[in-house]
Amino acid sequence: MEWGKNIIDSLKWSDTIINREGKEKVAKEIAAKMKDGQIIGVGSGSTVYLALIAITERIEKENLHIQVIPSSLEILMTCIQLRIPQTTLLDKKPDWTFDGADEVDPQRSLIKGRGGAMFKEKLLIRNSTETYIIVDESKFVAQLGSKFPVPVEVFPTSLLYAEKELIALGARDVSLRMAKGKDGPVITENGNFILDAWFDSIKNSFERDIKSITGVIESGLFIGYDVEIMSI
Ligand code: 5RP
């Protein structure tokens, strides 16, 4: 048996991905962008997963040589399952990156982080000159924060301080994200907690304001990034 394959292959994505058909269409468009020899940054989430499947099909059919830089352990393991070669930001810079989003406003600003991977996702986008955000139509909103809270990854012992500062910034509700079906909080792969902060309106300065709270690692706000939105 190949080292580690059994345990990695036992990891499964849900069979019930919301709006799978729409997501598959944009996933195919992303795969069509890939050129032989490229380094590609890969965000997280179910749309990204479907894009990786489409990418694998092209790699196998056309014998392409590409490397990906995954933004989370979940996506890293998916790449291992699909046998897509990986590298890291310590070794290579991506030619381009693709990722999903939870909300996209008319100015192309985003809320991300339902999967809690926004720190490494942002790092990838910051390192890329071209970024494609792949979304189905359900992700478009007139105003950020209308459907989802802003996720904020915080160092564990700064939890209460960060909560107080988010409220001082105008959050009407802040909650600790809990693990589904478990009693404990979500622990990110960086060993931190996630606070979900609801705001009535989100100012452009909030990404910077939240980041400046001591103990905040990163937030899921992506305001004014040079990204191309790809939708169906
Ligand atoms: C994870 C993310 C995802 O990109 C976002 O949650 C969208 O996920 P999906 O494609 O499953 O709808 O930011 O941290």
Image: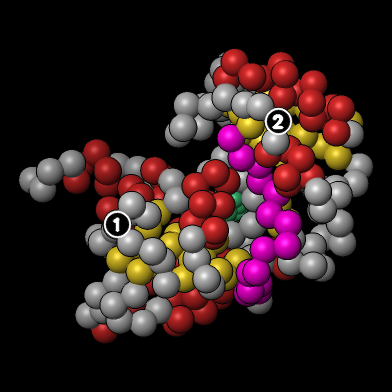
At horizontal 60% and vertical 66% (from top left) the residue drawn is 133
Q: Quadrant of the N terminus?
A: top left
Give the SS element for disc 1.
Answer: loop
Three-letter amino acid code at disc 2?
Ile
What is the C-alpha distance between the residues marked 1 and 2?
A: 31 Å
At horizontal 35% and vertical 69% (from top left) the residue drawn is 39
Asked if residue 62 is positioned above or below residue 141 in the image, the reply reads below
Q: Is residue 87 left or right of residue 184?
A: left
Write down the residue under mark 1: 91
Three-letter amino acid code at disc 1?
Asp
Residue 199 x %, y %? 86, 39
Asked if residue 113 is positioned above or below residue 154 in the image, the reply reads below
Work out whether residue 181 can be spotted.
no
Write down the residue under mark 2: 213
* Crowd class of label 1 (few under 14; some 14 to 19; many from 20; radius 10 Å): few
Q: Which residues are magenta?
A: 217-231
* Crowd class of label 2 (few under 14; some 14 to 19; many from 20; radius 10 Å): some
Residue 202 x %, y %? 85, 48
